[in-house]
Image: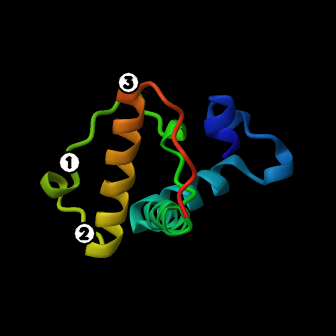
Amino acid sequence: MWHFRVGGPWRDLPGEYGSWSTVYDRFRSWAVAGVLQNLMEAMIGEAAARGQADLDLVSVDSTTARAHHHAAGMALDPALLQELEKAAEEEKGVRERGKKPKARS
């Protein structure tokens, strides 16, 4: 997370985290194995299930454009997908009316 927060090169990783090459190798193996993607999906799913998904925190990096999950072959639990789409539609409607979104229960 230091790398993404600071934006520095891996070689500048503070020594308290260990060897930069070891940290990078572990990060890369987790990324390739899908560990980071699974972790993010689980966190978003849990927040949505609790009604705590705050779409104001969603950010798009201008250097990357992703296809819709159907186009990319991403598979989600249908109930989770429905909950996420419902939350997005509610957020869109609230923004169009110029109101602050209410907390979901």
Indicate how the structure is coloured in the image: rainbow
Task: Work out whether 34 lies above or below 3.
Answer: below
Q: Secondary structure under badge 3?
A: loop
Expressed as whole percent of the image width and height from the top left, the position of residue 6 reads 69, 30
Depth check: 52 or 16 in front? 52
Q: Secondary structure under badge 1?
A: loop
- Measured in 3D between alpha carbons, the distance from the residue under mark 2 to the one under mark 1, in whole angstroms, is 11 Å
Q: Residue furthest left?
A: 71
Image point (49%, 56%), residue name: 28
Q: Nearer the viewer, mark 1 or mark 3?
A: 1
Image point (53%, 57%), residue name: 104
Task: Work out whether 38 lies above or below 8.
Answer: below
Examine the rendering and report whether any part of residue 10 can be seen.
no
Q: Which residue is mark 1?
A: 68
* Residue kind at label 1, given as amino acid type: His
Q: Secondary structure under badge 2?
A: loop
Q: Which residue is mark 3?
A: 62
Q: Residues within 10 Å of mark 1 (few under 14, many from 20)?
A: few
Q: Which residue is mark 2?
A: 75
Expressed as whole percent of the image width and height from the top left, the position of residue 77 reads 30, 75
Expressed as whole percent of the image width and height from the top left, the position of residue 57 reads 54, 39
Expressed as whole percent of the image width and height from the top left, the position of residue 43 reads 54, 63
Depth check: 71 or 102 in front? 102
Q: Residues within 10 Å of mark 2 (few under 14, many from 20)?
A: few
Label pair 2/1, CB-CB below 8 angstroms: no
Image point (55%, 64%), residue name: 105
* Residue kind at label 3, given as amino acid type: Ser
